[in-house]
Amino acid sequence: MAFEIKNTKKKENAIYKTLYIKEALVKEIDKIAKENNTSFNNVIISMIESCLKK
């Protein structure tokens, strides 16, 4: 499933949560973030929003 990295220019109110993620998965997400010149957090949020689209 493809997803689009969201634009961080239009920030909304947010809540802090902690996730425990396998090291291998973190490395993959870090790679995606670096390739797209964005943050780890932005990649995660973009993935979650993509999965929740109806």
Image (spheres, rainbow, N blue to C red):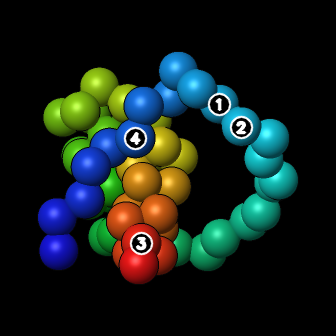
Q: Which residue is mark 3?
A: 53
Counting from the top left corner in percent of width and height, residue 33 is at 31, 40
Q: Residues within 10 Å of mark 4 (few under 14, many from 20)?
A: some
Q: Would you say 12 lies left or right of 46 here?
A: right
Q: Which residue is mark 2?
A: 12
How dense is the environment of label 1, judged by Cα within 10 Å: few (below 14), some, or many (20 and up)? few
Q: What kind of element bears circle 3?
A: loop
Q: Which is nearer the eye, 41 or 52?
A: 52
Query: Label 1 to label 3, Cα distance in Å?
Result: 19 Å
CA distance for labels 3 and 4: 13 Å
Residue 7, x across and y down, in percent: 42, 31
Pointers 1 and 2 in contact (CB under 8 A)?
yes
Q: Regarding mark 1 in the picture, which secondary structure is present there?
A: loop
Taking the spot 65% from the left edge, 70% from the top edge, the residue there is 19
Q: In whole angstroms, how far apart are the C-alphas of marks 2 and 3?
A: 18 Å
Q: What residue appears at the point 47 percent right and 63 percent down from the top-left corner?
A: 49
Q: Secondary structure at mark 4?
A: loop
How far across and down, in percent of the image, does residue 28 sit?
Answer: 26, 59
Looking at marks 1 and 3 on the same chain, the residue that comes earlier in the sequence is marked by 1
Closer to viewer: mark 1 or mark 3? 3
Residue at mark 2 to residue at mark 4: CA–CA distance? 12 Å
Amino acid under label 2? Glu
Disc 4 to disc 1: CB gap under 8 Å: no
Q: Is residue 2 left or right of residue 15?
A: left
Name the residue tied to disc 1. 11
Determine which residue is flagged by label 4. 6
Confirm or deny contact between disc 1 and disc 3 (CB under 8 A).
no
Viewport quadrant of the N terminus: bottom left
Give the alpha-carbon distance from disc 1 to disc 2, as whole Å: 4 Å
Q: Is residue 43 left or right of residue 9?
A: left
